[in-house]
Amino acid sequence: DFVTNLATLAEGSLNAGLKAYFEPPNETWNFQYVGTNNGQLREQARYPSLNPVQAYCEWIGRTCSHLGESVHDVFGGDTSRSAVVCAFQAFGGINASTQRRLDAGDYVSEGGTPASDWATHVCFANYWSAAYYNTATETTLAATYAGGGEAGDAALTTYVQSSTLAGTFSLPTLLTHGQDFYGLAVTYDKRLCFYEGGYSPDFGGGAEVTAIRSDSRLHPLMETYELQNMN
């Protein structure tokens, strides 16, 4: 009864003009979180042939359906005051496995309803980083930056500017993913939203690499790139 009770509390407590957003467990693709492990194991117990991605995505589809139906019932389907968010990992892409989050094919085969019947929003995390992130070029630039002076400043700028180059987590790649998820939202007649996101270089790789990643966040170009990301 947790979701129903929470939705009831929200419905009775919301100030005028506010909307309550409900979402299944956070980042159910990240195995640092219990939800991903729990979802994978539960669905593989039901359907042993599922691989890990299919399993935790199917579980989110099942969970989002339960959550969405409960919220719908409590709010009487009033989407001006409530929203149900189905989240995706941007860099996991869209494919038959990840679309289980909306379709929940195995759950539907049991007589359940797809999450797409209840979710109002498709969401993805718009994280990004420099194209040189986690490359040999990053290591070289980090060493130059550690030496300081004009050469160090130039190395930092070069590192930050690589955010606009093609790369695994760079801005152009994120834009492509954004267009893909916009298409997914249109296909399912959902709103598109984002959570967390922004420039997010994970630290690590030694002191010099950590320093250039950390200090890159404060570079003046970051304001321009963050606006590009949001737009």
Image (cartoon, helix red, strand yellow):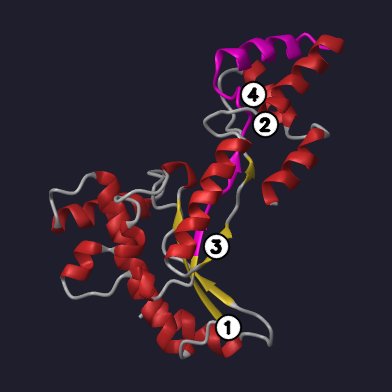
**Mark 4 or mark 1, which has the lower sequence index?**
1
- Please name whichever residue, 227 or 22, is drawn nearer the observer in this view of the structure: 227
**Mark 2 or mark 4, which has the lower sequence index?**
2
Q: Indicate the position of residue 182 as horizontal and vertical percent values.
A: 52, 57
Tell me the distance, in whole angstroms, between the alpha carbons under discs 4 and 1: 43 Å
Q: Is residue 138 above or below residue 7?
A: above
**Mark 1 or mark 2, which has the lower sequence index?**
1
Look at the image and give the residue range highlighted in magenta.
122-148
Q: Which amino acid type corresponds to the residue marked 3 in the rendered image?
A: Leu
Residue at label 1? 81
Going 49% across and 46% down the picture, which residue do you hit?
A: 90
Going 34% across and 48% down the picture, which residue do you hit?
A: 95
- Check if residue 164 falls in the magenta segment: no
Residue 164 is labelled as 2
Q: Which amino acid type corresponds to the residue marked 1 in the rendered image?
A: Arg
Residue at label 4? 210
Tell me the distance, in whole angstroms, between the alpha carbons under discs 2 and 4: 21 Å
Q: Nearer the viewer, mark 4 or mark 3?
A: 3
